[in-house]
Image (cartoon, coloured by chain):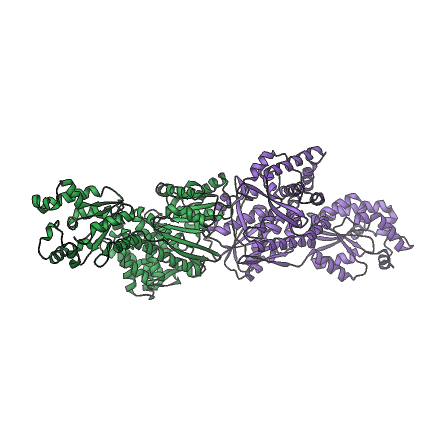
Chain colours: A green, B purple
Amino acid sequence: MAGSGNNFILVGSTGSGKTTIGRRLAEQLRLKFVDTDGLIEQAAGRSIVEIFRAGGEPRFRALERRVIGRAVKEAAQVISTGGGSVLDPINRARLKRAGLTIWLKARPDVAAARLDRATDRPLLGQGDRSQAITTLLREREAHYREALLHVDTSDRTTDEVVAGIVRRLRPASTSVPVTAGQNKYDVEIGWETLPRVGERLAALGRSGRVGVITNPRVAALYAGSVTRSLRAAGFQSFLITIPDGERYKTLRSASRVYDELVGRRFERGDTILALGGGVIGDLVGFVAATYLRGVAYLQVPTTVVAQVDSSIGGKTGVDHPLGKNLVGAFHHPILVYSDVSTLSTLPRRELVAGLAEVVKYGVIADASFFAFVEDHADAILGGVPDVLTEVVRRSVVIKADIVKQDEREAGLRKILNYGHTVGHVVETCTGYSKYRHGEAVAIGMDFAARLAQDLGMCDGQLVRRQRGLLERLGLPWVLPPIRPSSAIRSMSLDKKVRQGRIHFVLPQGLGRVNVEPVASERILATWKRAAVAKEGRNGILIDRRRVGALSG
Amino acid sequence: MAGSGNNFILVGSTGSGKTTIGRRLAEQLRLKFVDTDGLIEQAAGRSIVEIFRAGGEPRFRALERRVIGRAVKEAAQVISTGGGSVLDPINRARLKRAGLTIWLKARPDVAAARLDRATDRPLLGQGDRSQAITTLLREREAHYREALLHVDTSDRTTDEVVAGIVRRLRPASTSVPVTAGQNKYDVEIGWETLPRVGERLAALGRSGRVGVITNPRVAALYAGSVTRSLRAAGFQSFLITIPDGERYKTLRSASRVYDELVGRRFERGDTILALGGGVIGDLVGFVAATYLRGVAYLQVPTTVVAQVDSSIGGKTGVDHPLGKNLVGAFHHPILVYSDVSTLSTLPRRELVAGLAEVVKYGVIADASFFAFVEDHADAILGGVPDVLTEVVRRSVVIKADIVKQDEREAGLRKILNYGHTVGHVVETCTGYSKYRHGEAVAIGMDFAARLAQDLGMCDGQLVRRQRGLLERLGLPWVLPPIRPSSAIRSMSLDKKVRQGRIHFVLPQGLGRVNVEPVASERILATWKRAAVAKEGRNGILIDRRRVGALSG
């Protein structure tokens, strides 16, 4: 995830274009431009060559560390760093936390040519500069490689490079149509698009009032931007907040929202806007489904799970003390408006938990998407805009395709429950407090894959590859200690049970799953084997601790 | 309404065939046959001729009154009465309360021919019997005419007459298809069909469990019959009861039903059966719409409102403290199964209240149906099976037609709200306790017609004819004392308001209505005139008292 500083940090060898490109990039993004070498000269009151001459490299590095330490305290900047700054581990850590790092690469010969007449690069000396650059690169490349974006500047103009970076940092909005029965609506996926939600709603022909329903945490971040946008587009808007957390996804909370809406004489022609994650989306969707027998609403999801899954498909509902989503309705929004940049403000653990659903899509429907997630795991975790947007878009395409084929979960749509049967058990038996939904689903997916392997439906390669990706993303997969008999009992209350048989979504290969009724003895057998495996392997419980560390 | 005794009582002149037809009718209906003349002879230990000879007509009439007094204490009989029994007002009142009265008519010449050789008719003497019958008839016909069914036996065989009566008392089931969007289902309308509901449900391909949800009053009457039928058809069934009354049509009651269903691990493949009136139907429909995001349910309506209106069209919901049906969903049943005979057990006032919706259908959609209700008002109130069944059937046809054209109440369906705008005001401002829903709707229909007249949309003839029918059925139409300003305020919370304008369904003529936004000043003007009219006319408030008396 991009650091809280929300900066863009350019790293790379001398001659790669950091200063020129950085300045132009800052202009385009309307951000402040900061050049650490410049700041050093300013701080020292002399040129870099002079600093080197007077105090040598150690003096320069000390100054550089101090300057970087100050620069990363600001936000919303493009920071161009000196080529050797990455050698210092403190600098590296600070830069990583401060924002999204971009490695500008240039072939040594190109870099050398660019520096042909430069006299301010003390480390290059006066000999074969291309050779000197190659030498420096050998020492530094591993650190550059840690940057989230790698941009080759060798054979492109500054404008081309900057345009390319801007496309990646501010990806254009795309729209995925959803067709579900007679309902047709768009999922609009963009970056920093919240300030335009009012326009978009007006373009749908809505008018009147908009009730923005959210939780206090999300309200603090986005309610201002959303309501300003609504008012600018001619809507009257008001805000209703529900306490944050799954334990408030209840009929009682819904009832309080009804009270508010009735009290405000909310009418059929008015619009509800659900701003937040899955809990808000499900609860508000249910209120929209049932207030005056159904009013129009739009989903403005701000979490991974909500953007890739729960906002699409019209499933709404609240929890019952004995099970999740036991009370609900199908009610499609008139628009899903996903501003992927909102994911930048998520706590690390929540982002990671949401990625379980992303991995799920790869396994159930699209092997190439699974590979894309494998290839871009760091960029996803680092919050690279175009990669995150692409992850959301491809997930939405998969979900929309499944919903289109089976609006009411009569058949195909059940495959979306991959990992959820045991996931629900994990959540229920741990009181919905220990695991995030996505973490529980990750554990459930590993179980389902193992069960499929035990039943001879898939090979161990699939189990290992899925587990590997879950681990890389920081997701747990080890079953917590739950008595197998309790697990089976818990499963039998699940909606995926029909006439006593427990239905599992089981992978046959990447991108292919089947829904099968499984006898409870087979489930028990895999459960016991999984539990033993855990105990038999040292340290496997660091799974949970790792997630904790990542979210710290 | 047929008396609580549920008997069929044959009245008519001597020679009309009461004994022969009564005996055959009792066989066909599998009821006990009782002949009061026979009972008199039994009680006296001698023949009627002998009784007349010994004590004259007074002695006979005294015995007859005693015998009838005893006979009407039993239920489920066909009672053949002596031709002169109707002369006694106590007999008339008792017979009326004891069940459905049937007048067997025969032309005097036919009756005389039938009695050609009879010697046991002391009042006919030995002269021109046809003439004697004509004379008796002159004296008695007004009383015979009060019978609910008039059957001419003159030129028909006993079998033909009995078959004709049976067709009227046990009308065959009919089925009205409902198409609403992608939902298609039947409304099956029959007489004494509850004991076959299990078979019918099985024929739809359902299996598994059936949760019968009802209130204690309806449960006491019908739950046994329904659950026996379900079990006989291979279903497991269980019963959930909700306290009786509109004030229990709440989210809290729904929540208690969810708890029961969750507790019983009710599954998606199981079926809910809503047994009762509109409150049960709406509430249970809402639960079915929202439990596990929608399970299959069937409506088994047992009140007029439920059979002619609320069970059809998929509107479900619960009330909010600030307004009726503010929380709900559209969810169509898989079958509406109407046993019209259940209306026989309704308290008089409830039957009458339900008829307001019937009158409504005539006004909004079908002038000939309005005339049918006018022509059969007594038979409807008396619960004549074929007439009641026809009333339900024609109402359902009208409702189904409207629902088909406008499933989601986007346009046409709004005409069903005729009388409801002011009806809701009346209910709300009197705390939902003084008036039944139908009574409030009757008052609302009278108001809407007056408003239409004031706006020049219809003539006074329509207002008078509607009012006349409401009165004949025992429905109120006078506005209760509600401050006009409170009324307008109450209206503006109604769903029929859009952007502040108050929409009214206004009649243009019988069978033709329009939905129009009306300025609140015009409504106020009509309201004030209506209130003044009430105060200016003496005794008009007996409206309310009449209903009270009828329901006593």
Where is residue B67 shown, x and y percent of the image? 77, 47
Where is residue A110 shown, x and y percent of the image? 17, 58
Going by the picture, which residue comes out furthest to the front? A117
Q: Quadrant of the C terminus of chain B?
A: top right
Q: How many marks?
A: 0
**Quick check: can you spot residue A545?**
no
- Vertical comparison of B4 with A177: above or below: above
**Quick check: can you spot residue A264?**
yes
B204 left or right of B376 in image:
left
Where is residue B352 shown, x and y percent of the image? 66, 45
Which residue does the image show at 58% across and 34% down from the upper left? B485
A394 left or right of B172 in image:
left
Which image quadrant is residue B29 in?
A: bottom right
A440 left or right of B118 in image:
left
Which residue does the image show at 87% across and 50% down from the upper left? B135
Where is residue B496 shown, x and y percent of the image? 56, 44
Going by the picture, which residue comes out furthest to the right? B127
Nearest the eye: A262 or B433: A262
